[in-house]
Structures are given as structure tokens and as C-alpha cells.
Image: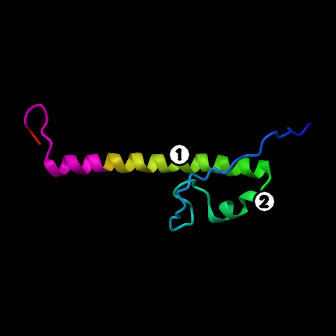
């Protein structure tokens, strides 16, 4: 089997929002501290793996945000006593 030749270096996913959460993940690029610190020393294969991990992190964050939005909507409906078609709560 042949190794694929990389013509271009895989660029950093950094977007310039360099602040970390409690677990050390950057709010901007979603990389861990170690992933950020070692980026320049990583092979392209390692960088692709980090990018794959970032996609999974983004998906988990979106699912969490969707659940939070849904819960807020449910809480709001309970708080204001939404009436149904027949004027009942």
C-alpha cells in the first residue's frame, strides 16, 4: 500500500479566540491544551486525527445546546401557563 503524499501542510484550526474552558479546551478551535501545544510538531496524520476529534466535539456541543434550548422552552411554557385550544392550561 502506498502512502499518500501531502502537498500542503494542514493548517491550524485556530480562529484567534484563545480562551480555555475548565477542562482546557479552547473556546475557539476546540483543541485541548496538549493538542494546541504540540500542533507544530504533529505529523499531518496526527493533525487529521485532531481535526476529526474537533468535529465530534462540535457535534456534542450542538446536541447539548439543542437540549438546553428545548428545556428552556419547556420551562417557559410551564412558567407562563400556555393555554391550549380550549383555553385550558
Residue that extends furthest to the top in the rendered view of this protein: 85
User: Looking at the image, which residue is at 56% across and 61% down?
Assistant: 25
Camera-side residue of 2 and 81 = 2
Give the x, y percent position of residue 27.
51, 57
Q: Indicate the quadrant where residue 26 lies.
A: bottom right
User: Looking at the image, which residue is at 51% across and 49% down?
Assistant: 60
For the residue carrying disc 1, how many other residues have a C-alpha within 10 Å: few (<14), some (14-19), or many (20+)?
Answer: few
Asked if labels 2 and 1 touch by Cβ distance under 8 angstroms, the answer is: no
Q: Is residue 71 left or right of residue 82?
A: right
Residue that extends furthest to the front in the rendered view of this protein: 16
Using the numbered discs, state the Cα–Cα distance from disc 1 to disc 2 in whole angstroms. 27 Å
Give the x, y percent position of residue 42.
77, 56
* Residue for badge 1: 59
Residue that extends furthest to the left in the rendered view of this protein: 87
**Range of magenta residues:** 72-87
Q: Which mark is residue 41?
A: 2
Amino acid at each position: 500500500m502506498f502512502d499518500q503524499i501531502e502537498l500542503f501542510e494542514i493548517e491550524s484550526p485556530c480562529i484567534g479566540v484563545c480562551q480555555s474552558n475548565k477542562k482546557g479546551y479552547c473556546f475557539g478551535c476546540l483543541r485541548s491544551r496538549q493538542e494546541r501545544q504540540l500542533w507544530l510538531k504533529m505529523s499531518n496524520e496526527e493533525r487529521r486525527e485532531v481535526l476529526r476529534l474537533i468535529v465530534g466535539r462540535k457535534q456534542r456541543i450542538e446536541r447539548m445546546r439543542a437540549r438546553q434550548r428545548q428545556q428552556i422552552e419547556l420551562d417557559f411554557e410551564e412558567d407562563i401557563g400556555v393555554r391550549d385550544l380550549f383555553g385550558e392550561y
